[in-house]
Amino acid sequence: MSLTQLIQTFQSGTLSREAFYSEIDRVLAGGAGSGARLREAMDATQTVHPLPDQVYDEVLRRIERQRDRAGNGDDATRMQETSTASYPSVPSSVPGAATPDDMEHLKGIGDTLNGRFVLEECLGVGGMGTVYKALDLRKLEASDRKPYIAIKVLNVQFRGQPSSLIALQREARKAQTLAHRNIVTVYDFDRDGPLVYLTMEYLSGKPLSRVLRAPGFAGLPFEKARPIIAGMGQALAYAHERGFVHCDFKPANVFITDSGEVKVIDFGIARVFQRPEEDPDVTVFDPASLGGITPAYASPEMFEHREPDPRDDVYALACVTYELLTGKHPFHRKSATQARSEKLRAERPPGLDRLQWRTLSAALSFDRAARTATVNQFLDGMGVLPHAAAFSAARMGAIGAGAVVVAGGLWVGYRAMSAHETPRADVATAVAASAASEAPALAASGPALAASSAAVVASVLATSGPDANAPASAAANVTAAASAATLTSAASAANPASVASVAEPTPVPDTAALAALNASLARIPCSALDASVSGHALRVSGFAGAGGGVARVHNALARTAGGRGAAIDVNAVQNHYCEIVNTFAPYWRANRQAEGGATIHTRPPDAQLTQGSPLVVDITTPHYESYVNVDYYALDGSVVHLVPSNHERDNQAPPNFAATVGSTGDWLVDKPFGTEMIVLLITPAPLFDHLRPAAEPRAVWLAAVDQQLRTMASRYGRDHIVADFVQITTHARND
């Protein structure tokens, strides 16, 4: 008999449970693909005549064991008890409809979709479709180093539904808006005759379900489970912020890549729980009508067909977390409704402190009102966020215009950094800054002493640590400081009054006078300036327009008590960059007032780059979790988005983060030559819900960014948006 007949025979009572299991094992012994066929048959019958929970779960376990042996395990999504009257079949006269003859010729491994995607391997079967590893012939033709993608093809029971194409289109669009490092990247959807499919990034690794179902698995120590819990939770929290509940979160929908990254997949039945009036789709199609649910991880409210809520995902996340820590499901893989009726209670896992256990048990509550309200609260209570995994190495796209040519640059070198740790690269910068601040005093004693002091500092740094790059960069910084000291000395010789001002300390402005000075500096056109007191010295730093900006700084200082003795470290900005400076100046000042949590520096520190040399920048992030945006403003009036980009959507950073961009030497300086600008912008949420074009006119970008920043400032507070700039000057190579 067919698989469907086998299941129906058991449901009629003709076949005992033991005999049914025996027949299932015989089917699964039929080789590759038998598990997938059985799953499709089960899904087809579950809609009308669902199997008992215990029987359904046992069959799934047997399928999983068979897949584990074949190296391809996953969890099952079962169809809720819903009448098929809601799913009328597509008439055969409808173009593209799946007829019985079509079903006999559906494509599989070895076949090609739309003449482009060659299906090479079955990666798994989910509630909505089967996922294949596919070779993209177009990428292969273009010599792409990563020609493989993943393709999800709709299961049989969806192909005859008029809503199936809508379902996949909505899934694609939703997933494309969820650009997060812990969410799989979705590209597009299409159809080939009766087949409807979705294309997404190919991940090399294994689903979490295979880890949990491995023989002898008894749970991970908390420290090893921490990054997995954090990755899963941050993906869900990100989706919730954008109004989506996953609705089918389970181990099979969590993927662990070979590099250790955590990726959440299959937002296919996620339902919008915030329904904006401007979204017309919510009145046309609701994926909940497809009825997907996984009993072991679904909240009681999902069985009761209640409106989706983030707390449904909290329950599922808690179940997966419990399993990850103990190797066991908290309620022995029973559905939430069955566990509630039996008054089951999860046992406390070993190794969790009181707060962690209270957090986990609250998240496992069968009552939505008593359950942990948000994923972020769950992550905080579990104590996983402070040690969230750092960025992995990630590829960025080609700039394609301006002075820097990118041949496939890498954003590398990310690592977690404690709040009290200073990167070695920044040590040199700090020493240089310190030396520069002492330049007037050194100059007063003569250039010889200044140069000697600089040499001593460089010598100390050269032997202060194992970082081979630090001595060279330190020496360069200190040399720059020595040069500044020498220049100051020469200026002092020409102007004895300046020597006197150094020799006799002048009073610094009080708090009120300093605030007034900063307000005056903020009114200078084409400027980003900050006045601060360090020790007993007044310093003004930042950027000002080349056409009189520095003169206005001197005028402002002249009206301030103690201003004439201030140290001025102001970079001249060309007029064609004034629009950039004016847009980001408020956030640059906020960054300075927050003591420079976000920084961007070039290597070498003087930012003088020669044709053919690499562009390398170091960045740091503030003390809170943030989103990093790095943009390159070219001489031709365009702006190129480095992070995020089509090649690298992930731009989320944990607190106190340090990164090096371009250290592999993939960014090479080329013509046109001149002075250009790179801007680091840190925001508390993604700047846009979608990716911008790889390059666009500067005016268009700045107008869009200005509007977004104003909206974001009103929602999150202006102090959580900070920026930093760096100017680079490029020169032709002298051959």
Image: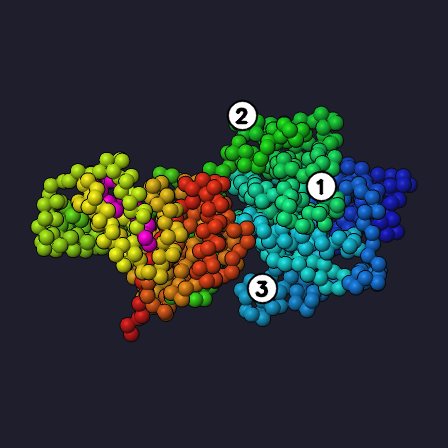
Which residue sits at x=68%, y=55%? 169
Residue nearest the viewer, comparing 22 with 9: 9
Mark 2 Cα within 10 Å, few/some/many (few <14, many 20+)?
few
In primary-sequence order, the first of circles 3 and 1 is 3
Residue 482 image offset from top left, x and y in percent: 18, 53
Which residue sits at x=37%, y=52%? 582
Gap in Å between the C-alphas at discs 1 and 2? 30 Å
The amino acid type, in three-letter code, at marker 1 is Thr
Callouts 3 and 1 close, C-beta under 8 Å: no
Mark 3 Cα within 10 Å, few/some/many (few <14, many 20+)?
some
Q: Is residue 621 visible?
A: no
Gap in Å between the C-alphas at discs 3 and 2? 49 Å
Gap in Å between the C-alphas at discs 3 and 1? 33 Å
Query: Residue 596, labelled with which disc?
Result: none
In primary-sequence order, the first of circles 3 and 2 is 3
Residue nearest the viewer, comparing 347 with 649: 649
Callouts 1 and 2 close, C-beta under 8 Å: no
Which residue sits at x=77%, y=41%? 80
For mark 3, give the secondary structure.
loop
Query: Residue 294, labelled with which disc?
Result: 1
Is 166 above or below relative to 330?
below
What type of secondary structure mainly makes up the magenta span?
strand
- Which segment did they paint magenta? 525-540
Residue nearest the viewer, comparing 184 with 368: 368
Query: Residue 354, labelled with which disc?
Result: 2
For mark 2, give the secondary structure.
helix
